[in-house]
Image: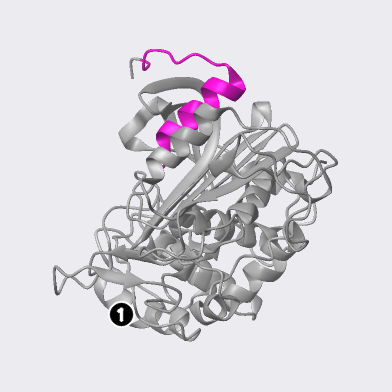
Amino acid sequence: MKHLFCLLALLIVACEAVDEPLDDDDDATEPPVLEVEDLPSAIAQAFADEADGAGAALAVLFQGRLCAGAVGSKDPDGGEAVAPTTLFRIGSTTKMMTSAALLAAVDRGDLDLSDAVVDHLPGLDLAGAAPFADVTLHHLLTHTSGISEITPIDGGEDDDRLQDFTFGGFASTSYMMAPAGAFWNYSNPNFSLAGAALEATDGRLYRDIVHEDVWAPLGMDRSYFLGSDVAADGDFAQADTYDWTGQTADIQRVGATSYDDAWSRPAGFAWSSALDLALWGDFLAQGNPDVLSEASHAALIARHAPMAAYRDLAAYGYGVMRWTGTQAGDGWYPVDTAQHNGAIPGYAAEIVTVPDVDLVVATLGAADGAYFSDTLQAIFDELLAVEPIDLPDN
């Protein structure tokens, strides 16, 4: 099984200057430069154009070779440049990691995906159109629980909040919209509850479980949950965004400790770097027995639940979107992907993997809606030499 950190053909280039090789005297703490080859200029140009002045980072892993680079500054007012090591919030891409942590517990025999949520969170109940007692862990990880949406943004980083809000504010405000399994509906509480159930069963804090069982075995040492850890690290991007409270129309400057919510954490509050997300993407595409068994990795990326709005084109695995064909720029490409994006005030993230050809693309942006579809199109065009087709009649 291939692991990214032990590849012999590691390629690191600066994506904002792909026509110039890196100096061998670069800081020794950066990833080693074993070989330097340029990315096609069309990819680098698309990335710079789409960043549009915002801080952004890109990692491309293709058939065992890695390119990582960045554009812009860590502060919207200018200053220190973003690097591939720079931390960004990754939003809902966190869901994949929550799923992996829960599946690791399945591998250990600590729980089963067919378990009712109330088996691990006894006493929890919701009002509504159907019994909450029928909701299983499988329903949570596939967004088929029927639970309504609620996503607190700034309840604080106190770890006790994951359990306290589950039995408090969540239980009193959310409700069952439909019977479990009736339809697919994206709802962040599914993953908050998955994290709470995992934590209650395991005995460790949710964030420690993910760090110890998922990030550490993959070598993801640039990934955090606590804003205080990000602030202490110091290498993070700031952004300008809307007032998430809805109380004003003012633009807010956000950084490491501007907001946090321990209850929403399993659904989308992690921080990471482009290089760490390349490690994650490699695991997503290839697996790693130090994290999950072969069977659990297959379950992670299986097509469990058709995503209703897209019918035959997309299905949800366990925190992973599976697309039969992928929209990139203005084209529809016949490539089968496992992916997830994330949006959170001030930041956007996306991981797209094409397992059949060993391609991983990870992008991070310090701006609302900072997705890089034209960059993905350039990567498909230049690296895969695949032609777009007409969107299937669906």
The residue under the point 84% across, 48% down is: 6
Residue under circle 1?
169
The residue under the point 56% across, 69% down is: 235
Residue type at mark 1 is Gly
Front-most of 113 and 301?
301
- Residue 324 shows in this picture: no
Could you say where residue 244 lies in the image, as x and y percent from the top left?
25, 69
The quadrant holding residue 123 is bottom left
Front-most of 100 and 228?
228
Region rendered in magenta: 371-392
In the image: residue 20, left or right of residue 364: right
Could you say where residue 32 lies in the image, as x and y percent from the top left?
78, 52
Would you say residue 136 sits in the magenta stretch? no
Could you say where residue 274 lies in the image, as x and y percent from the top left?
58, 53
Could you say where residue 388 lies in the image, as x and y percent from the top left?
45, 16
Please, what secondary structure does the residue beneath circle 1 have? helix
Front-most of 140 and 378?
378
In the image: residue 326, left or right of residue 382: left
